[in-house]
Amino acid sequence: MARKQHVVVIGLGRFGTAVARELTRLGHTVLGIDRDEKLVAALAEEVTHVVQTDATSGEALRDLGLGEYDAAIVAISSNLEASILTTVLLKRLGVKRIVAKAANDLHGSILEQVGATRVVYPELETGLRVAHSFNAPGVRDYLDVAPGYGFARMRVPAEWAGKALAQIDLRRTCGVTAMALHRQGVVTLNPHPSEVLQRGDELIVAGLDEDLERLPSADQR
């Protein structure tokens, strides 16, 4: 199972609240931050910790010990300056994984340049999907189909390339079932066990959330 982490979610609007709640449900230690007292109070009983503060204050973020956190989610997009400055400050504090919400392509490009390791666009990605793809390093996208169960899209990791699905035996090794194979724009439903995977392939798999967390990341070396 993926290691549970200490995560800070900055910006507790609809998107940030959804991410914070779901990450808490998945077992992570979550700190929620917003400058709006009402938003902070509304989430106080649902996540590990909440704090009312200005995330554009480097001193405030340092005093909260955010440099020791595993990751941060910057869920601010209505105030572009605050979003960018917060990302810069988190990067300076040494947070290695920063997921930032962008209002548009230009905003997203700037966020990447100043230190965001991943940019998400709320019109394309819901908070729940971001939480699940965050929780499982191997998952690129997630669709909730029932409580605790979903479909996930994953890129085939290097160690699987050149091997048949039967050799990998996803049900035994990861507890999931391969539903489809996406290769160069062509989708094959219910791929045969003899299908040999290639670099660049993507698999759609189904399983329990706890098993989806075990999927390896294509970025692993």
Image (cartoon, grey):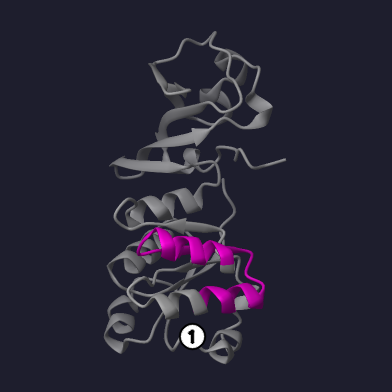
Q: Can residue 210 be seen in the rendering of this structure?
A: yes
The image shows residue 71, relative to residue 40, as above or below, that is above
Which element type, helix, strand or loop, lies under badge 1?
loop
Quarter of image, res 101: bottom left
At x 55% / y 40%, what residue is drawn?
Answer: 214
In the figure, is residue 97 to the left or right of 183?
right
Bin the neighbour count of mark 1 within 10 Å (Cα to Cα): few under 14, some 14-19, many 20 and up. Answer: some
**Badge count:** 1
**Residue 181, percent from left and from top:** 45, 21
At x 34% / y 71%, what residue is drawn?
Answer: 46
Which of 11 and 119 lies nearest the eye of the viewer? 119
**Residue 88, percent from left and from top:** 57, 75
Q: Quadrant of the N terminus?
A: top right
Q: Amino acid at mark 1?
A: Thr
Q: Which residue is mark 1?
A: 56
**Residue 27, percent from left and from top:** 47, 59
Q: Is residue 105 magenta?
A: yes
Classified by dominant secondary structure, the portion drawn in magenta counts as helix
In the image, the segment drawn in magenta is 86-113
